[in-house]
Image: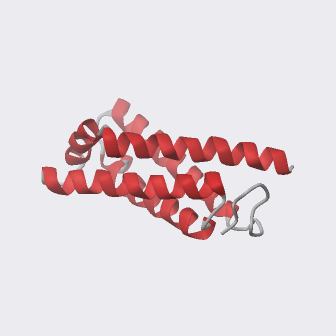
Amino acid sequence: MAIAFLIARIILGLYWLEAAYNHIFKSAGLVGYTQSKGVSSVGTAKAAVIGTGLLALFGGLSILLGVWTIYGITALVVFLIGVSFKIHAYWNVQDPGQKYMERINFQKNIALAAAILAMAAISQPWVYSLGW
């Protein structure tokens, strides 16, 4: 089971590191999308995208390396809850196709938050981690 948990951490950590990379270094499209969801100014939208990228970076590294895991878990849950209710608020969408896509993203994010929260129940330090 220790190897399975390590593989899961690697996959999950890399998922968040890719998200962080996109938020920080390829933010233009995400800034426009964030604005379309009601974040009014370009500066505010850019700050939100970069800020969530930093949460993803910290959380991804935390999960991958097994360091400061409670803080990393918290960062990712904050990311997921905030993004889910602001950006993927499918109940505000009129177009049926887009509503469906936003609902899928909302549900995916809530499921990810639940899975990541479950990791908080695993005793510390995690096996095969740097453990600080």
Residue 128 visible to an observer of this rendering: yes
Query: Who's the residue at 18% across and 57% down the image?
Result: 44
Which residue extends farthest right?
1
Numbered-mark total? 0
| Quadrant (top left/top right/bottom left/bottom right) for the C terminus | bottom right
Relative depth, front residue between 44 and 3: 3
Quick check: 76 left or right of 68? Answer: left
In which quarter of the view is residue 124 placed? bottom right
In which quarter of the view is residue 81 placed? bottom left
Query: Who's the residue at 50% across and 45% down the image?
Result: 17
Relative depth, front residue between 66 and 102: 66
Relative depth, front residue between 65 and 51: 65
Query: Who's the residue at 60% across and 68% down the image?
Result: 68
* Percent x, y of residue 32: 21, 40
Relative depth, front residue between 98 and 105: 105
* Percent x, y of residue 74: 53, 67
Which residue extends farthest top?
97
Which residue extends farthest left?
41
- Is residue 95 shown above or below 122? above
Query: Who's the residue at 14% across and 50% down the image?
Result: 42
Quick check: 27 left or right of 42? Answer: right
The colour mode here is secondary structure
* Percent x, y of residue 23: 35, 45
Quick check: 101 left or right of 17? Answer: left
* Percent x, y of residue 96: 35, 33
Residue 115 visible to an observer of this rendering: no
